[in-house]
Image (cartoon, rainbow, N blue to C red):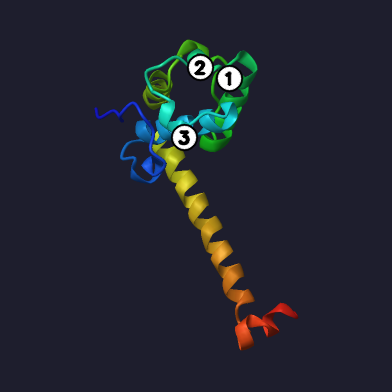
Amino acid sequence: MQVQSSSYKLDDQATATTPVETVQNWLIKQLAEQLNLNPDKIKITEPFTRYGLDSIDAVTLVGDLEDWLDLDLPDTLFWDHPTVEKSAQYLADNYDLADALSNIESEETKTAEAVNQTQDNKSDKKGWGNLFGRFQ
């Protein structure tokens, strides 16, 4: 099994090759946002508590992860598996992450297509730098 390096890179989400890496990248991104940290400073082998994750933040993060994966997860996930690495591995061992992640990718594709279609419809009238398109 290949495990990602200890530090996070902003483009890792796009280059993740396994479900474990994808979940690790998501967790790092969410931890950084929720706790106002630099993602590059989060190591997958360090306990969540080292970064200041308390019980309220942990339950909130589990809820966000449930929403993202569309799975029911234990509220104590991050206390029972207290690192990014252990949590992601637990999820991979006990849940069908490949199926959950493929559902996420198909939803993102549908959303991107809908946005592109909306943008295409608005740009039908191009005259003078789209001046006429502004008066619909």
Question: In the image, what residue type sits under mark 2?
Answer: Phe
- N-terminal of the pair, mark 3 or mark 2, is 3
Q: Is residue 36 left or right of residue 48?
A: right
**What residue does disc 2 label?**
78
Kindly report the distance in space between the C-alpha atoms of the residues bearing marks 2 and 1.
6 Å
Q: Amino acid at mark 3?
A: Trp
| Location of the C terminus (image quadrant) | bottom right
**Label 2 crowd bin: few (<14), some (14–19), many (20+), radius 10 Å:** many
The residue at 39%/44% (across/down) is 11
Q: Is residue 125 left or right of residue 82?
A: right
User: In front here: 24 or 74?
Assistant: 24
Residue at image mark 3: 26
- Judged from this view, the residue extending furthest toward the bottom is 127
For numbered disc 3, what is the local secondary structure? Answer: helix
Residue 122 position by quadrant: bottom right
Outermost residue on the right side: it is: 135
User: Residue 81 placed where, x, y %?
Assistant: 45, 14
Could you tell which of marks 2 and 1 lies nearer the N-terminus? 1
* Front-lying residue, 118 or 74: 118
Q: Is residue 52 visible?
A: yes
Residue 51: horizontal and vertical position, in percent? 51, 18
Badge 1 element: helix
At x 37%, y 40%, the residue is: 12
Label 1 CA crowd tier, 10 Å (few <14, some 14–19, many 20+): many
